[in-house]
Image (spheres, rainbow, N blue to C red):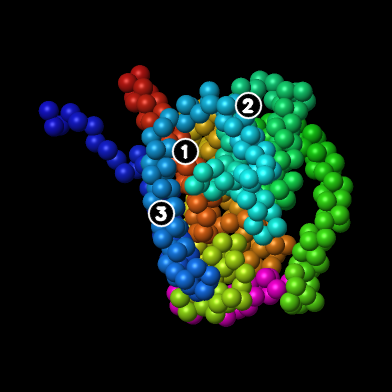
Amino acid sequence: MGENKPKISLMAHDVQLLFPVLFLVGIGVVMVYSASSAIARESYGNSYLFLKKQAIFALAGAAILIVCRFVPYRWYRPLTYPLLILVLALLAAVHYPGLGFEAGGSTRWLHLGPVTFQPSELARLVLILYLAYSMDRKQGQIKAFSIGYVPHMFVLAMFSVLIITQPDFGSVVILATITWIMLFVGGVRIIYLVITVLMLLPAAYYMLIHAAYRLKRLMSFLDPWQYPTGEGYQIIHSMMAFGTGGLWGTGVGKGYQKLFYLPEPHTDFIFSVIGEELGLVGVVIILGLYGVILWRGIGIARNASDTYGSFLALGLTVGILLQVCVNTAVALGLLPTKGLTLPFLSYGGTSLLVNMAAIGILMNISSTGRRTIVTKRRRGHAAQ
């Protein structure tokens, strides 16, 4: 009897994807405490405040990852449009007095009873689900302007209008880039996509010059040392953190810039704290872990059992890695400052939970793809 029981293989759970994610989450909990303890003690009288919250987020994220790992990814197909309507409603509710929560000059958070979350993070996941579902259904007509291009751009526009008015320009750029890449890979005519970019450039320029804070960010990005106490303050102290870290870093908990010099050290600029306390070696390890996630994500997309799974895996992988690219580039002074978190590392419940859900879905696609490959091989051997 015991010999007939199916054996559970670790590879069925794609440990090559799971371990880097868990490692990053563990590092994130430690670094959130290191980056936030002084601020939490000064502002709230409890140096462990953000540590406790991040640990709870990490446990909740692990639970969501497990659930999404075992929920067949095809079950999301009939939920696509209900989820789309729900997220649009949540994004609109952010602007409703009493529900929207303002912080740092932006109204990006939503209060629903005791729960506070950021709908734009959920919007990224739902947009990917929609694009994967829609592109899979329309594969035979994906090159048609009215079928393969217009509906997807219309949905992106609805998301963008609701998010840009928060304002959150960085999230809109991420959503637009994800959409562009998925449509390009899906087979939409490149001329449509190129014309879209050319048409959006004047709009982006208009939004830049008519928003004083965005213009200041651009000027400080070009030469932060001209604005050492203003818009260039964050970039300067971020680069100072990396410079202080050197090769091996100052050691966990021994960083200096997080002590009320570097703004938002446990959220937007946690990569700078890592650079100071773990040095170049720590930075390379972190980027290497993200590289493994990219490698596995692309592999899962290529080996998915159907086009829906392939598109979904691609979108989820691109969504995570775009955040990594933008956040790290901002911390290194390669891009103007944006309010985007570093996946699995930055403090924040919504970002961590959504990204853990994305990893769970990727693992389910991977498992389904592996079973399909094994089944085909067995049928091939049987035929021989």
Going by the numbered disc 3, the residue's amino acid type is Ile
CA separation, marks 3 and 2?
35 Å
CA separation, marks 1 and 3?
21 Å
Q: Residue tagged by mark 3?
A: 56
Q: Nearer the viewer, residue 130 or 105?
A: 105
Name the quadrant containing residue 126: top right
Q: Nearer the viewer, residue 69 or 217?
A: 217
Q: Residues within 10 Å of mark 1 (few under 14, many from 20)?
A: many
CA separation, marks 2 and 1?
18 Å
Going by the numbered disc 1, the residue's amino acid type is Ile
- Residue 243 lies within the magenta run: yes
Mark 2 lies on a secondary structure that is helix
Q: Nearer the viewer, residue 259 or 205?
A: 259
Name the quadrant containing residue 209: bottom right
Mark 3 lies on a secondary structure that is helix
> Residue 237, percent across and down?
65, 75
Q: Earlier in the sequence, mark 1 or mark 3?
A: 3
The chief SS type of the magenta part is helix
Q: Earlier in the sequence, mark 2 or mark 1?
A: 2
Going by the numbered disc 2, the residue's amino acid type is Ser
Name which residue lies at 45% across and 74% down: 252
Q: Residues within 10 Å of mark 2 (few under 14, many from 20)?
A: many
Mark 1 lies on a secondary structure that is helix
Q: Are marks 1 and 3 in contact (CB under 8 Å)?
A: no
In the image, the segment drawn in magenta is: 232-252
Q: Which disc, if any, is residue 361? A: 1
